[in-house]
Image: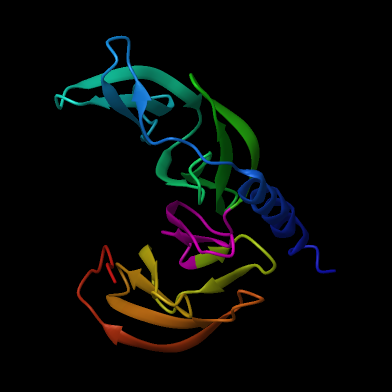
Amino acid sequence: MNNKIKPIIKIAKCILIILLISGCQEGTVKDEQGSSSYSFYVGTYTDKNSKGIYKYSLHKDGSLKKGGLAAKTANPAYLAFSMQKKYLLAGNEIDKDGSGTVESYLITDDSLLLICWQSSGGAHPCFITLDQHGFVLVANWTGGNVGLLSHVGHEPTRGSWPRNICLSPDEDYLLVANRHGNNIVSFQRDEWTGIFQYVTHIEAPSPACIVL
């Protein structure tokens, strides 16, 4: 087996396992007065005073409350829940030896418990999404590629600074917004292997986000 593939398979097993064993989790919690509130997490840049991922709550009257630091980690600039919201994935927008990282956390009452982490396949991962099969897709901003944290490695985006990615509703295609490449690129994705195959691209001025 190719040595470059092994570490990617390692995180794939970890993430796929936690997705399979995750149970249902309520989206609301009760505060001391018995009214409903919603917990949410905020990813931050840690180059100044911030230290990582913070937990907050939104109350029924619209007020906000800071719960504190949930996990100490470097530049968790993008967060994504697992399918049933029992686990949280964080994209660490860093460049360490040419790559960022993706971390997987178990959500507990007061904190986030780190389960595992792995290279994103490129520098400064800035966007993460999961498909219905448990594949984790990552846009590596300055790395100029998209990472597939599962059976295969990563694929060049045919542009520079991929800022956002989006799966088609049937999950057969992946669209990539290359901010400095000034284009949108489409890839066909194999349903079983997850492997990307370039299809086409179209010009777009400094694309930053795709909604489909």
Q: Position of residue 81 (x, y in %)?
A: 46, 46
Q: Residue at horizontal 78%, vertical 59%?
A: 6
Is 103 placed left or right of 16 in the picture?
Answer: left
In the rendered image, residue 135 lying in the magenta stretch gets the answer: yes
Looking at the image, the residue that sits furthest to the right is 1
Q: Residue at horizontal 61%, vertical 32%?
A: 114
Q: Position of residue 38 (x, y in %)?
A: 31, 30
Above or below, 143 against 62 in this view is below
Query: Camera-side residue: 78 or 27?
Result: 27
Q: Split into 4 quadrants, where in the image is the C terminus?
A: bottom left
The magenta segment: 120-145
Looking at the image, the residue that sits furthest to the top is 32
Above or below, 148 against 33 in this view is below
Q: Residue at horizontal 73%, vertical 55%?
A: 7
Q: Residue at horizontal 27%, vertical 10%?
A: 33
- Residue 136 image-quadrant placement: bottom right
Query: Camera-side residue: 16 or 197?
Result: 16
In the rendered image, residue 47 lying in the magenta stretch gets the answer: no
